[in-house]
Amino acid sequence: MWRNGLTLVVGGVMLAACGGGTSGSSSSGAMDTTKTASTTTTTSTPAPTPPGAASTTTAAPTSGSTAAPKPITGKTWDVKMVGDDKGYRFEPADLTIKVGDGVKYTNVSGGPHNVNFNTVPPESKAQLDANMPAQSAGGAGPKIGELNSPLLITPNDTYTVSFAGVKPGQYLYNCTPHQALGMKGQITVQ
């Protein structure tokens, strides 16, 4: 009987610790907890910025925020996804494009491959994610997360990303299955 009570208490503590939080929250903020008869409400207040200091808080899109996809209005560039006896790589690994261009990724060999954007200008995250179709042209599986393409499993599977509506900057990406093998690339948007 005491085990059931202990399990209930531990479960409640875990639920309280995990519930209502957001990823990326800082422990430097103050927490206010208001308890009523059957509910607990927790709110977070950011720590004050000292006088004369610049604020480091930036508004980032939440995972629930949406932007409308924007079509390619410029050139479409080709990037090959290769895995062979020379290693795993994107060809070319570094590409310079313009806002409005698109990039078509093609699995040539050594798949499965994907495109996982891991460094993106913060103000472009929601738009780039919206510009990444839910499935590849060949219908290969769904996207595997925010700023992640589906897995391109067979040779000649393709996936095209529009860079319309994004801000100029550096867009770093990798292939999730082959990240440890150095399969990464960089797009510079002008």
Image: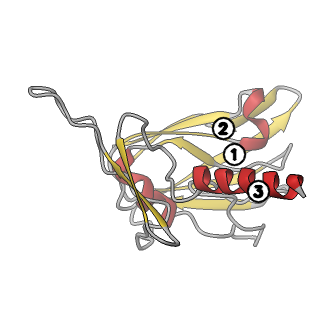
- Looking at this view, is 120 or 13 the one in front? 13
Q: Nearer the viewer, mark 3 or mark 1?
A: 3
Q: CA distance from mark 2 to mark 1?
A: 5 Å
Q: Which callout, 2 or 1, points at the residue further toward the start of the chain?
A: 1
Q: Which residue is mark 3?
A: 151
Quadrant the N terminus occupies: bottom right
Q: Which residue is mark 2?
A: 91
Quadrant the C terminus occupies: top left
Asked whether disc 2 touches disc 1, contact meaning CB atoms under 8 Å apart, the reply is yes
Question: Element type at marker 3?
Answer: loop
Q: Position of residue 28 (x, y in %)?
A: 37, 34
Which amino acid type is shown beneath numbered disc 2?
Answer: Glu
- Looking at this view, is 180 or 162 the one in front? 180
Q: Which callout, 3 or 1, points at the residue further toward the start of the chain?
A: 1
Question: Element type at marker 2?
Answer: strand
Q: Does residue 98 appear in this view?
A: no
Q: Position of residue 42 (x, y in %)?
A: 43, 57
Q: Which residue is mark 1?
A: 80
Which amino acid type is shown beneath numbered disc 1?
Answer: Lys
Residue placed at 78% from the left, 67% from the top?
Answer: 140
Horizontal relation, residue 79 to residue 85: left or right: left
Q: Nearer the viewer, mark 3 or mark 2?
A: 3
Which amino acid type is shown beneath numbered disc 3?
Answer: Leu
Quarter of the rendering containing residue 74: bottom left
Q: Residues within 10 Å of mark 2 (few under 14, many from 20)?
A: some
Q: Which mark is residue 143?
A: none
Q: Residues within 10 Å of mark 3 (few under 14, many from 20)?
A: many
182 lies above or below 143: above
Q: Which callout, 3 or 2, points at the residue further toward the start of the chain?
A: 2
Quarter of the rendering containing residue 47: top left
